[in-house]
Amino acid sequence: MKGSFIDNLPRIYGIYTGGFIGFIVIMAIAEQMGMSAKAIGIAFVAFTVFIYALIGYLSRTAQADAYYVAGRQVPTVFNGMATAADWMSGASFVAMAGGIYFKGYGYMALLVGWTGGYVLVASLLAPYLRKFGCYTVPDFIGTRYGGNLARFCAVVVLTVASFTYVTAQINATGTIASVALDIPFQYAVYIGLISILLCSMLGGMRGVTWTQVAQYIVLIIAYLLPVFWISNKMGAGFFPHFMLADEVARIGELEQQFGFIANSKEDLALVPKGLAGITKAHSAVNATPWAFISLALAMMMGTASLPHVMMRYFTTPSVKAARKSVGWSLFFIFLLYSSAPMLATLSKLSLIDPTLSTGIIGKSIAEVQAIDWYQNWNQANLMFISDFNGNGTVELNEFFMGGKAVVLATPEIAGLPYVISGLVAAGGMAAAMSTADGLILAIANAISHDVYYKIIDPKAETAKRLVVARVLLVVIGFAGATIAAMEIQGILGSVIWAFDFAMSGLFFPLVLGVWWKRANRQGAIAGMILGLVSGAWYLVWVRSGGSGFLGITQLTFGIFGSAVSLVSMVIVSLMTQEPDKATQKMVDNVRVPSGKTILGKQH
Amino acid sequence: MSNQTKHWEKSRGLLFITLAIWFVFSIGIFLFGAEMNEVTGPFGYPWTYWFTCQGSLGIFVILIFWFASRQEKIDEEFGFSEREDE
């Protein structure tokens, strides 16, 4: 191939995409020839993970700026894809459609929040942090405000938020690996972890960037193909996003017809843990304005404070490219997020509409219990029916399903070949791996660069710094996997907490660092410490039975934390001396795109 | 007023416009979620439902690209755009 690697990117990933589609076709043919479902599942996960590991190996590097910021030469569109994969976690891929399916409008605040946050990223932060030329987010805090204490506080907030998030992702890779490879979860978690480390260990940010692009391609094909296929098969419309209004209305009619009958406590006690029935209207507004807006707002501000997203924009060649790249990121995220409600609609209609052959409501209990897919998913503890009222037929309030089943089981319910289910497993694995990689790298880089190199041993040589960075990567990965193997929290709850922690401690110190020249070190330290502590206190208080105030729940505690952070930062800044001339000049320089970065190329 | 001050004032103006549009489609319209959902919107979906599924999300994508190109124009106007670009 002629020209550099970067020049050839469209060709390389074009060939890769073609190869992956070819692999799907081969698997489809193998299925027709009698390959077992289990073998197809193993082949999909093993093949894709092998490709990522190969990319990780080919991207190995011994240079600091390649390891930390991929040499700052990632083109806008590719950085957009990498950010989208970095962003869309196992939760987005596996749990989101399920959340929409069960909770409707109130849950869809997450869709608005997880996209709207990018407007804040693009306008308030990303281009300025790119101009700064930092390697990590604490690098910005440490240089803008000065002093090791400020830098260290930023590392603490970053670690708390990212670590909460990463255990959930390793948990998700473990779940998928254990289902696809048919091994116990406790071992599957470590297989997931090793796959994750293979992508990031040798190449750092460079390796993660190019595997994330590859993972995005797998996950978006795996998400969109079933949605379009099911929609066409049901005759719901060629392009579901524009053509499902009738189906949404039909679900509303059926809900009216069946009615939402509440189950008694005794009946519900028989339902396996984690499964839920349909108790909320599909498209009606079922949350108060504040419940919706507060959740969306918390997710938006959290988005702008999460370091694994922010550091992706340090890898673009210029400030201009950083801005455009945020737009591309959101475009690639939009492709999946706008499809999740469509999948929820198709899934629900195929299950509850008695006029469709796949519908189970109104059929006899015995008939449903005899269906193959029901038996499979019942065995996997993701589906359950019970004849509470004893009339022999399945009613709307007698059918229960796990949130994950909406994505994982719908292809099978709609009668798609098994090859699609294998593809979906590979997609879920890609989504969880890419996010876990970004997060582990964010933590390890912050500790190796900001704590080890900047605070402990500023004279360390590059080779030694990179060894420390890699050792930390492995240590943090294993710590995360160990906690994930204990299975303490659900996937989605801990993801949302991560956003709240990040916004509590980092949102205002980051934004005011660029937009308010008067912000000083004392103010930033107060903002980070008091914000994080008060947010964490609120979470503990509400979880231990506290009533909370202003309708702020354990999912939106960041609103309280960040308010405390803002107030304390402003008050302390104004009470102490304004930043010196050099710092003010630095802020002025950050605000114009041209000229040298604040921090040198090697720092 | 120096060139740089003017550049920053204009950039700040653009920020306020961007954040105002962002506010309308991420927060403002959901104050009236229940009322708006009674009305049929694009492609036949109820309005609020459509905004949460596609509308607001798509508007954010367009808003960021619009913001990026406006900011580039401001940078050029004051001679602050980067020279050695991709």
Image: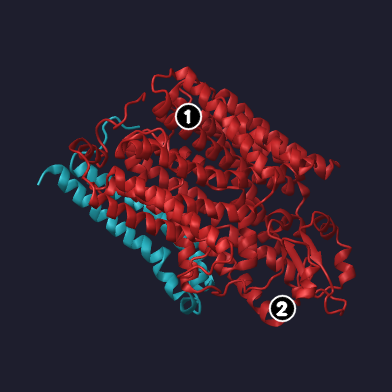
Tell which circle, 2 or 1, labels the residue nearer the N-terminal end. Answer: 2
What residue appears at the point 47 percent right and 22 percent down from the top-left corner?
Answer: A465
**Callout 2: residue from which chain?**
A
| Residue for point 46% across, 76% down | B36
The image quadrant of residue A454 is top left
**Tag nearer the camera, 2 or 1:** 1
Q: Amino acid at mark 2?
A: Ala
Distance from Cα at disc 2 to Cα at disc 1: 54 Å
Q: Is residue A135 left or right of residue A50?
A: left
Q: Which mark is residue A448?
A: 1
Any idea which chain is the cyan one in this picture?
B
Q: Position of residue A261 (x, y in %)?
A: 72, 80
In this picture, is A579 found above or below A109? above
Kind of residue at disc 1: Ser
| A260 left or right of A321 in image | right
**Residue picked out by circle 2:** A262
Quadrant placement of the C terminus of chain A: top left
The colour applied to the residues of chain A in this rendering is red
Residue A6 in sight in this render: no
